Every structure is written in structure tokens, then in C-alpha cells.
Image: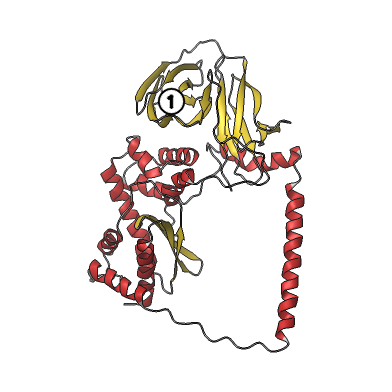
Amino acid sequence: MPGNALKILKAFREASQWQGSGEAVLRRGDDTGRVFFASGKIAWATASTIKKTFTTYMAEEAKLDENELKEVFAECKRNGRNFGETIVEWGMLDEPSLRKCLLHQIAESILEVFLWPDVASMFMPEHRPYKGNLTFDVAEVLQRVIEIDSDKRLPFHDTPVEELLKLAAQVSAAPEPGPAPRKRPSRSQPALYIAAAAVLLLGAVGAAFVLRARSTSTDANRLKRDASVAIAAIDAGAIAPAATSDAGLALVRADAGAEKPPAKDAGAPAVEAVYRPPPDGIVALAEGDGEGRIRVTSEPSKASIYVDGLAMARTTPFVLGHVASGREHVVMMEKDGFAPAFTRLTLKKNQTADVKLTLKRRGKPWTSRVVVHVESEPSGASVLLDGEPFKQLTPVDIALPSSKASKLVLIREGFEAWVHPVRPVPEVKVTIFAKLKKK
């Protein structure tokens, strides 16, 4: 069997023996293949020479609306949920059909990599948890790779999968060749080493000085520049900062990041371990006692949806998943030419609630301003509202207009920008509690 195939099989074998998570990285020049493993099973795979994203693939194979899939992807990035399992939960596709599509897409990517010449392989173990159930055994994936190789381009097309796995085990057990003996440096070489080390040290000190000087600049113009990219994502129709085009990556990265413990920030002030919201207020993006769902419909349909003051990525009719139970929520809907309407409700554990609102064409418009309390973890984040900076850092109270959505941006050094359209409801007290993600 050609060495390329053996290299890939060896990386797969090593990854399948690792009980945590990690990536088998396969390279050919500028082309890269990546296969993500979770507890010894394959969760997703990509090949840079295949330009089709997973959302495009799902739209073509499962006949789903690609724009809706992109909205689900953006929602998963914001909430830290699993992309594939959210599709199932929201009733867009049943799990057997999703598994079939995902397995075929993974097999196509791996088949592509197997056909590359001169592949270099490496397994990079990680310790991030993965709580999704959409994973596949290596044997199952290899069998599918062979099945879709209709032109019999693989050198092992007629080889049983069991034999392939045995070959991978034999290659993994073989000792690696030792390094070539190093030549003894001449007497003139130590001086060169010392000079090179000095240059590197001076360069590192200079770079650190420049970075420190930049990090101390916190004027309003810098904040506006830092927020411009995040605000552009909102203008383009995204809810969170622009997501990676590698849709396969979202199958694990979105929810793996939610499980990752926050890193310590030595320069940040002390933050309480548990946030205590005011008892009489509604808390957006807060942890609840369980998970719930809200089926949102309106008359007329195609109305924009706001939950606890935060804009959602979809219009009615829609099913909101993973809504915190045990806390009160306010659901508001609006549509051009109609007055907005809202309702308040509290979900029980694992409850699915139905919310239908009738919008009045000639209703009274909202004109008041509503004070919204904004918290962040860690605290001390700079605040921008529609591009204009606030003098105070979080926690802060902000008076927002109820007549329109405002672009709220939270920025803190070392963390990703938190961006969201916010529209409060008159006389409804809301606390926005944003957990900032480490860069």
C-alpha cells in the first residue's frame, strides 16, 4: 500500500486511541485536511480542496433552505450549541437523515485527502470536551469512503476495512527512525549562536514594548475601530461576530467552547463566581434551571423576534431552542407597518410553550426609553451603543429607545467583542448578562 495511505491510517489510529478530543491534520503543500476526533470517534472532516461548505452540502442533499441553515449556524455560534443536533431539535431534519448526510460529507472529505500525493500527517490531541452524539467509528467512515469511490481510485479499494485497521496498527507499532547524528559545532559557531540569541531577545523585548504601548491606548477612537468589524457583522445580517466559513468546524467548536473553563485574566478585577440578578428583573443570556423551547408564531407571519430584548436571527414562525427554564422571559415581535406586541412567560423544566401574537396594523408606536442593566463576565468591559462609547465600564445602566433596535457592543482586552441588537420593551426591566469569550 502507498505510504500516503499508511500515514493517514496511522494518524487515524492514533486519534482513535486518544480518549479526549483532537485533530488529525493532513497537509499537502498549501492544502489541508482536518479530521476531528472525540472519544475515539470522528465528529467531522474537511478538505481545503473541496470548496463546498457543510451548509451548502445540507441544502443540496437534504433539500433544506441554505439561508435558514446559515441562520441556525449563526444562532449556534451565539449560544454555543451543536449545529447538527440543533437542526434535529428544531425539526428541520430527523436524526437518521442527518447522520446519513454527515457521514457522506465526512467520507467525501477523507476520500479527497486519500487521493492527495505526498501527504504529511500529524495528530494534535486536545482536552476540550465534546458533548455531541453525531460521531462515527473509524471503521464505519472508512467503509463509506470505499463505497463512494465508484471509480476505484483508492489503492486499497478492494481491501476489507478490517485489514486496513490491522495495517494501521502495525504501522503505529513500528519504531520511528532515529534522528541523524548531529555534527559537532566548530569553535566559531557558539559565537554565532550567542549573537542570534541576542538579536531574538532584543526583538522580543521590542515587540512586547510595542504591544504594551498599544494595549494602554483606550481612547474613544480605538474603541470605535475595535468595534467596527463586529458592527459590520450585524449590518450584514449576522447576530454574532462573523463565523468561520468552515461549517464542519461548528459541529464541535460551538459547543466545545461553552464547556471550556474561562481562563484567568491577571489584569482584570476580581469577579464574583456566581452572578446574582435582581429578583424582579428578566435576565437575558443567563443560566436557567433546565432547558425549554418556545414555538413562536404571529399574525401576520415573517415578524422579527426579540427574546429578553435581544434580537433573534429568524422571523416567525420559528422554534426557539435551549431557553432557560425557571426564569421569566419576555417575547416581543414586530413587523414593518404594524405595531409591536409582546408577552411574558416562565418555562418549566423541559417545557415547550406556544406563543402566538397578533400584530395590529394601526397600533400606538413605542416612544419611551427603557433603562437596561448590562453586566459582563469578566466585568470592566467598554460599552458602545450604535458606535458611540460610554464613559462607564460594565456593570452599567443604559437608557435605550424602545422605538428601534440599538447595536450594543462590549469590548474587553483579550476577549472577543460581544455584539447584539437590543430592543427593550416599555416598563419591562431587563438585565443583559454577557459572558465574554477569550480570544
Q: Residue at x 56, y 42 (%)?
A: 241
Name the side, left or right, on which 168 lies relative to 211. Answer: left
Q: Residue at x 67, y 33 (%)?
A: 384
Q: Callout 1 environment at 10 Å: few (<14), some (14 to 19), or many (20+)?
A: some
Q: Quarter of the image for the N terminus: give it.
A: bottom left
Name the side, left or right, on which 29 lies relative to 5. Answer: right
- Quadrant of residue 383 in the image? top right
What is the secondary structure assignment of the residue under circle 1?
Answer: loop
Question: What colour-coding does the image apply?
Answer: secondary structure
Q: Position of residue 43 (x, y in %)?
A: 37, 53
Q: Is residue 184 above or below residue 11?
A: below
Q: Amino acid at mark 1?
A: Lys
Name the side, left or right, on which 194 lies relative to 354. Answer: right
Q: Residue at x 56, y 25 (%)?
A: 431
Q: Position of residue 296 (x, y in %)?
A: 39, 24
Q: Position of residue 299 (x, y in %)?
A: 40, 18
- Quadrant of residue 416 in the image? top right
- Quadrant of residue 137 in the image? bottom left
The residue that mark 1 highlights is 302
Whether residue 115 is visible here, answered yes or no, is no
Whether residue 368 is visible here, answered yes or no, is yes
